[in-house]
Every structure is written in C-alpha cells, then in structure tokens.
Image (tube, rainbow, N blue to C red):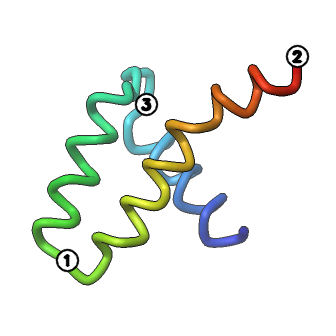
Amino acid sequence: MYFTDRGIEELASRRGDEEVTLEWLSEQLRTFVDVHPEFETPIERLASWLARLDDDELDDE
C-alpha cells in the first residue's frame, strides 16, 4: 500500500484544490494505457472492480 498511498498523496498535492473527477481519472488511465499497453489488463481489472463496488454494497443491505 505504500506506493499507492504515496501516489494518492502526490496526486492531491499536485492537483491542489482542483476537483479530480471520475471523467478526469478515466481519461488519464486511458492515456496511460495508450502509452503503456502492457498495463491494459490491470487497468481493466481495476475499472471492473470499481464498477462493481456499488453492486457489492447493495448486496449487503
């Protein structure tokens, strides 16, 4: 988790008060995969996991 937490802290400090939206994040991930296609599968898995989070929360109710 160290690298993930560090990356999130770096993102927050660089973006300042600017709101980071899902649209912005998805565009950045798309650009990253275009430059580094070897990361396409992990990025797709992350996106799928994030999309299912709401489904998991609904199942718990």
Q: Secondary structure at mark 2?
A: loop
Residue under the image location 58 percent in, 38 percent down: 52
Which residue has dot 2 on it? 61
Quadrant where the C terminus lies?
top right
Q: Residue furthest top?
A: 61
* Of the pair 5 and 33, the residue shown nearer to us: 33
Image check: 40 left or right of 6?
A: left
Give the residue type at disc 3: Gly
**What residue is at 20 percent from the left and 42 percent from the top?**
27
Q: Which of the two labelled residues, at mark 1 and mark 2, occupies the earlier sequence position?
A: 1
| Residue beneath the point at 71% across and 71% down | 2
User: Residue reaching furthest front?
Assistant: 59
In the image, what residue type sits under mark 2? Glu
- Picture coordinates of residue 38 (x, y %)? 26, 83
C-alpha separation, residue under disc 1 versus residue under disc 2? 39 Å
Vertical side of 15 occupied by 33: above or below? below
Q: Nearer the viewer, mark 1 or mark 2?
A: 2
Q: Nearer the viewer, residue 10 or 32?
A: 32
Closest to the observer: 26 or 48? 48
Q: Which residue position is annotated with label 1?
A: 36
Residue 47 appears at what percent x and percent y?
43, 49
Q: Residues within 10 Å of mark 1 (few under 14, many from 20)?
A: few
Vertical side of 31 occupied by 27: above or below? above
The outermost residue toward the bottom is 38
For label 1, the SS is: loop
Which residue is labeled 3 in the image?
16
Circle number at residue 20: none
Q: Looking at the rendering, which quadrant does residue 36 occupy?
A: bottom left
Q: Quadrant of the N terminus?
A: bottom right
What amino acid is labelled 1 in the image?
A: His
> Do the residues under discs 3 and 2 have CB atoms within 8 angstroms?
no
